[in-house]
């Protein structure tokens, strides 16, 4: 059971919410679910994300221990990204949130439309 104290600014629940609050974090994690991917391929998979934003997102996810960056020697050097076990543990909550959005998205859009019309 959670209490109001569980959602204080410095609590672990807040940390988890912050990780998923950034739009691109969940998208990048989901795009990596199939295994290691190079930066360019990842950008193509996602679509609509700039190279700069993807790089920033990957660094943020690596900082939080959710993504591993692997550099492979050779010419040219190759770098790919993959989920860590910690990152994989977020796939189920992301999937559940996506299922909720699919099921309730029309209702949310209708509420937004009503709100806009009434203002």
Image (cartoon, rainbow, N blue to C red):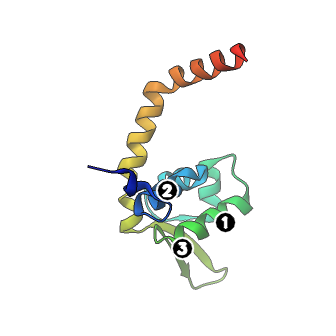
The secondary element bearing badge 3 is classed as helix
Query: Which quadrant holds the C terminus?
Result: top right
Rendered residue at 43%/63% (across/down): 11
Q: Nearer the viewer, mark 3 or mark 1?
A: 3
Identify which residue, 11 or 55, lies in the foreground. Answer: 11
Residue 88 percent across, percent down from the top left? 38, 60
Q: Could you tell me how far apart the alpha carbons at marks 3 and 1 are, in whole angstroms?
A: 12 Å
Residue 47 percent across, percent down from the top left? 66, 47
Q: Nearer the viewer, mark 2 or mark 3?
A: 3
Identify which residue, 70 or 10, lies in the foreground. Answer: 10
Q: Does residue 105 lie above or below 67 as drawn? A: above
The secondary element bearing badge 1 is classed as helix
The residue to which callout 2 is attached is 29
Q: Earlier in the sequence, mark 2 or mark 3?
A: 2
Number of other residues with Cα within 10 Å of mark 1, as a class: few under 14, some 14 to 19, many 20 or more: some
Number of other residues with Cα within 10 Å of mark 3, as a class: few under 14, some 14 to 19, many 20 or more: few
The residue to which callout 3 is attached is 63
Rendered residue at 57%/85% (across/down): 73
The answer to whether one can see residue 93 in this image is: yes
Rendered residue at 70%/20% (across/down): 116
Q: Does residue 50 lie above or below 72 as drawn? A: above
Number of other residues with Cα within 10 Å of mark 2, as a class: few under 14, some 14 to 19, many 20 or more: many
The answer to whether one can see residue 90 in this image is: no
The reply to whether discs 3 and 1 touch (Cβ–Cβ < 8 Å) is no
Identify which residue, 27 or 113, lies in the foreground. Answer: 113
The secondary element bearing badge 2 is classed as helix
User: Is 3 situated left or right of 111 in this image?
Assistant: left
Q: Could you tell me how far apart the alpha carbons at marks 2 and 3 are, in whole angstroms?
A: 14 Å
Q: Earlier in the sequence, mark 3 or mark 1?
A: 1
The residue to which callout 1 is attached is 55
Residue 113 percent across, percent down from the top left? 65, 18
């Amino acid at each position: 059971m959670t209490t109001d104290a569980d959602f204080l600014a410095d609590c672990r629940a807040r940390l988890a919410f912050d990780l998923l609050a950034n739009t691109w974090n969940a998208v990048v994690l989901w795009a990596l679910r199939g295994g290691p991917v190079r930066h360019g391929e990842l950008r193509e998979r996602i679509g609509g994300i700039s190279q700069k934003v993807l790089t920033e997102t990957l660094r943020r996810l690596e900082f939080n221990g959710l993504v591993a960056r692997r550099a492979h020697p050779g010419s040219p050097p190759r770098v790919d990204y993959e989920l860590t076990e910690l990152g994989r543990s977020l796939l189920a909550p992301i999937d559940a949130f996506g299922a909720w959005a699919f099921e309730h998205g029309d209702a949310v859009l209708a509420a937004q439309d009503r709100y806009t019309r009434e203002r």
